[in-house]
Image (cartoon, rainbow, N blue to C red):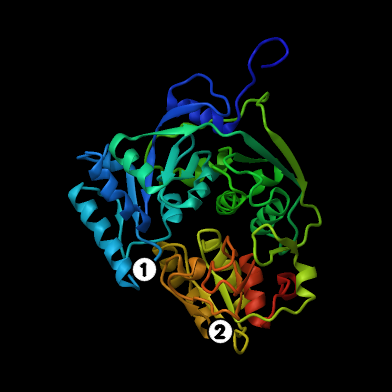
């Protein structure tokens, strides 16, 4: 309450949760029952099928609001993965779920939602993957939930949620040459840390955020998951509406934080003069300036350009400019995995695949690929990997002793060419 007895305004997350719960006002800590606008499942969604039937559910509440995307093991690389795929295919057929992105029309689940307009401003979106936060870039509350929670959502179209407090990240200054949204979010992670936003909303604002493209906003919201956040958000603007103009699957409900919103914390960041950043082993918040890390001449065995964080067409185009006419360093494996089949097709049309394969990289079909250590590009105990993905905890890409360095797509290319962690500005 403010001094005159009136209540505070609401943050962006509070505004959305008030809308979906039919309330005029909500406050952090309050339990609400929210109407879900979009439910997404990937392979882990196979674990929802049993609970769905066990609770006596017969039909999915709204087949038009459910999206299933196979993305982690594509095509199935183990018998276990094949079983998960089979369960989802059978469930989709039984429930007449029309929006199933199966092998050949697949992509990383968050990218599928983003590029096909499944999530719009003001939505409550839930998914069986922790990086569902990424969709907050359109001004939605998007969050990962567990399989039993998803079973209830599929049956009822509603979910109990605790309203999170909000951390506001205000960013100003112009990103310099060779410095990207990935570097910005790594910088933020270095300040907030991996537990600093646990079950909180992270709301990005300021002139630098407004200047970012939609793919760049997806990148920064994606990695709020590594801060422990319930959701990461950017308020919708003209760029958001233009991005969704041709693809939005349902009506938008754009909402904005009140001028007198009550934030738990505000962090101001000026990116003027900021260099590229690197998250060093074994945590995404172990962040150091790229020039300092590059001076250590850290040799790499594998380089990965992919993941839901940084494998959109803009990332791959930027990487191809640096890769063209170059060769992958002897003894280095460079894996490039686009975020969706449509991005793969775009790369094919633009000749980008050839740029990488002629350089000695392997360009794979769309999948989570090397990011999660369960499919392609698994690391042995002694190996070092430079990656454009979002996590470098022990065992993330295979052996727990392997070391992973997180960086921008441009930095992965520079590193693949030199064979050691390299500041991409040296090659621009």
The count of marks equals: 2
Crowd band around label 2 with a 10 angstrom C-alpha radius: few (<14), some (14–19), many (20+): some
> What residue is drawn where x is 49% and y is 30%?
17
Q: Is residue 201 above or below residue 353?
A: above
Question: Which residue in the rendered view is the most extreme toward the top?
Answer: 4
How far separated are the C-alphas under marks 1 and 2? 25 Å
Q: Nearer the viewer, residue 396 or 339?
A: 396
Question: Which residue in the rendered view is the most extreme toward the bottom?
Answer: 330
Q: Nearer the viewer, residue 186 or 1?
A: 1
Could you tell me which quadrant the C terminus lies in? bottom right
> What residue is drawn where x is 79% and y is 69%?
291
Q: Position of residue 33 (x, y in %)?
A: 42, 28
Q: Position of residue 324 (x, y in %)?
A: 60, 79
Residue to which mark 2 is pinned: 359
Is residue 26 rendered to the left or right of residue 119? right
Is residue 23 rendered to the left or right of residue 234? left
Is residue 86 rendered to the left or right of residue 22? left
Could you tell me which quadrant the N terminus lies in? top right
Where on the picture, by quarter, is residue 107?
bottom left
Crowd band around label 1 with a 10 angstrom C-alpha radius: few (<14), some (14–19), many (20+): many
Q: Is residue 183 above or below residue 292?
A: above
* Numbered disc 1: secondary structure: loop
Q: Position of residue 337 (x, y in %)?
A: 48, 70
Q: Position of residue 94 (x, y in %)?
A: 18, 50
Nearer-N-terminus badge (1/2): 1
Residue to which mark 1 is pinned: 74
* Numbered disc 2: secondary structure: helix
- Judged by depth in the image, the label closer to the viewer, 1 or 2, is 1
């Amino acid at each position: 309450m403010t001094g005159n007895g009136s209540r505070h305004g609401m943050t962006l997350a509070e505004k959305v949760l008030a809308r979906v719960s039919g309330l005029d006002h909500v406050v952090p800590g309050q339990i609400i029952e929210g109407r879900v606008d979009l439910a997404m499942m990937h392979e882990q969604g196979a674990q929802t099928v049993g609970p769905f039937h066990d609770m006596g559910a017969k039909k999915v509440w709204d087949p038009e609001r459910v999206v299933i995307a196979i993305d982690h093991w594509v095509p199935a690389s183990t018998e276990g993965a094949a079983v998960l795929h089979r369960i989802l295919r059978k469930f989709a057929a039984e429930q007449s779920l029309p929006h199933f992105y199966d092998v050949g029309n697949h992509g990383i689940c968050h990218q599928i939602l983003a590029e096909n307009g499944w999530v719009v401003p003001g939505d409550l979106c839930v998914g069986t993957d922790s990086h569902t936060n990424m969709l907050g870039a359109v001004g939605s509350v998007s969050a990962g939930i567990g399989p039993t929670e998803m079973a209830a959502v599929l049956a009822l179209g509603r979910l109990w949620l605790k309203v999170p407090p909000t951390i506001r990240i205000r960013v100003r200054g112009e990103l310099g040459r060779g410095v990207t949204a990935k570097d910005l979010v790594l910088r933020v992670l270095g300040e907030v840390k991996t537990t600093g936003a646990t079950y909180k909303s992270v709301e990005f604002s300021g002139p630098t955020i407004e200047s970012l493209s939609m793919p760049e906003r997806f990148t920064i919201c994606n990695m709020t998951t590594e801060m422990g956040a319930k959701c990461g958000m950017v308020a919708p603007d003209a760029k958001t509406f233009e991005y969704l103009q041709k693809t939005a699957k349902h009506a938008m409900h754009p909402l904005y934080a009140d001028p007198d919103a009550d934030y738990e914390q505000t962090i101001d960041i000026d990116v003027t003069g900021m260099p590229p950043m690197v998250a060093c082993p074994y945590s995404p918040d172990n962040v150091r300036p790229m020039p300092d890390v590059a001076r250590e001449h850290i040799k790499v065995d594998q380089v990965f350009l992919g993941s839901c964080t940084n494998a959109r067409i803009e990332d791959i185009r930027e990487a191809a400019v640096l890769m063209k006419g170059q060769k992958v360093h002897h003894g280095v494996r460079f894996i490039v995995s686009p975020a969706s089949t449509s991005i793969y097709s775009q790369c094919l049309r633009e000749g980008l695949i050839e740029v990488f394969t002629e350089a000695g990289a392997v360009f794979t079909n769309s999948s989570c690929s090397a990011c999660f250590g369960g499919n392609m590009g698994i690391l042995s105990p002694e190996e070092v990997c430079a990656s454009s993905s979002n996590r470098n905890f022990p065992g993330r890409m295979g052996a727990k002793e392997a070391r992973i360095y997180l960086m921008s797509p441009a930095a992965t290319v520079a590193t693949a060419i030199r064979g050691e962690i390299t500041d991409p500005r040296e090659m621009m």
